[in-house]
Each structure stands twice: as C-alpha cells, then as structure tokens.
Amino acid sequence: MVKVVPTHAEDFGSANTRETPIHPQSFIRHHIQLRATLQHSEAWFCARDVGRLMGLEINARQVVKLDEDQRQMMYLSGNDGAQETLMLSESGVYAMLVYHYCPENRHLRRWLTHQVVPMLHQESKSVSGPHVRLMSLAGETLKILHWRNEPWVRMRDMPYLVTQEGRGYC
C-alpha cells in the first residue's frame, strides 16, 4: 500500500472546484478589505485579509499550526476571475489572534464576533433559509422541513413514514 502525501495547496483541502467559485462578502475595517463567506453555516475568512488587519503576513506556512478543519483552500471570485485562496474558519482566526497576541487585536476580535459573523449569518438566512414542502404519502399529506440540505419530519408524522417504509414509499 502506498500513502500519497500532498506537498502544497492540496494540504489544506479544496472546498470547491474552479467551476464553482464562491462569491465572498466584503467588509471594510480601517480601509482594509476583509473577504468572508459562510459555508455550511460556518464563517470562513480570507487569511491574507485577516493578516493585513492584524499587521502580519499570514501564509500557508504560518497556518500549519492550525488544525485541518481550521484552514482550507477555496476558489473565490473576484475582479480578475476565480483565484485559489487560503481561508481560515472562525475558530482558526481566533486561534491566529491568540498565537500572534497583540492588545490592539482585541478590537478586531470584537468586530468579527459582534458585527461580521452575525452579518454573514443574517445574509445566509435571507438567501437559503429553511422552507416547508408538502409530501403526499398513502393518502396523507405530510409537512417536511428542508434545512441545511436535509429533510426533517415532525415526530407525529413518523408513524406514517415507518408504516409505509416497507411498501417502498420512502
């Protein structure tokens, strides 16, 4: 058995392909842009932008100390097309703030926590919030809630689904 070990950008895993670039939201603090996006209800921030806000240069080498779920390569759309960008999760940004502690960065953490992240979540709710659909099953109409790309059924409707499961309806 051969173990393949990636050597560069693949180390961080790619969230999407070139065909589906992510359109990030832009936030401005002290005339510095911060690009951020919400993926599966988790906030992700451009590492380069976070570094500029912290007064550092954050690159792939510096984020190796983060856990794998705190860093990821994503294709972000921009003025010059889609570019592969190193992104940090919300917990990854907070970890970088701790690793590179500077008292002035407390204001950056507060801004991220109280303004940026809530705005990302607020935008995502308006775009793809939960929605209810009706399903006909054995003469009954059931309500199914679709949330985070998964169907949810009320507990009181479960007996209909369980009894019909053996008949090939589900």
Image (cartoon, helix red, strand yellow):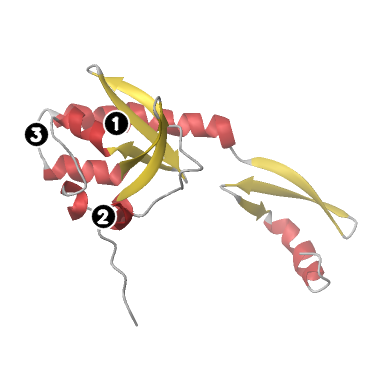
Residue type pointed to by label 2: His
Residue at image coords 32%, 78%: 2
CB under 8 Å between discs 3 and 2: no
- Element at badge 2? loop
Q: Which residue lies furthest to the right in this view?
A: 139
If the image is split into quadrants, where does the C terminus sit? bottom right
Q: Where on the picture, by quarter, is residue 55?
A: top left
Q: Position of residue 164 (x, y in %)?
A: 81, 68
Residue type pointed to by label 1: Leu
Quickly name the residue at label 2. 8
Q: Where is residue 42 in the image (x, y as percent from the top left)?
A: 41, 44
Residue at image coords 9%, 34%: 102
Residue at image coords 32%, 37%: 45
Q: Where on the picture, by quarter, is residue 133?
A: top right
Q: Which residue lies furthest to the left in this view?
A: 102
Query: Left or right: where does residue 67 sit relative to residue 74?
Result: left
Above or below 79: residue 89: below
Residue type pointed to by label 3: Cys
Dot 1 or dot 3: first in sequence order is: 3
Q: Answer yes or no: is residue 89 visible.
A: no
- Element at badge 3? loop
Dot 3 or dot 2: first in sequence order is: 2
Say which mark, if any, is on residue 22: none
Which is more foreground, mark 3 or mark 2? 2
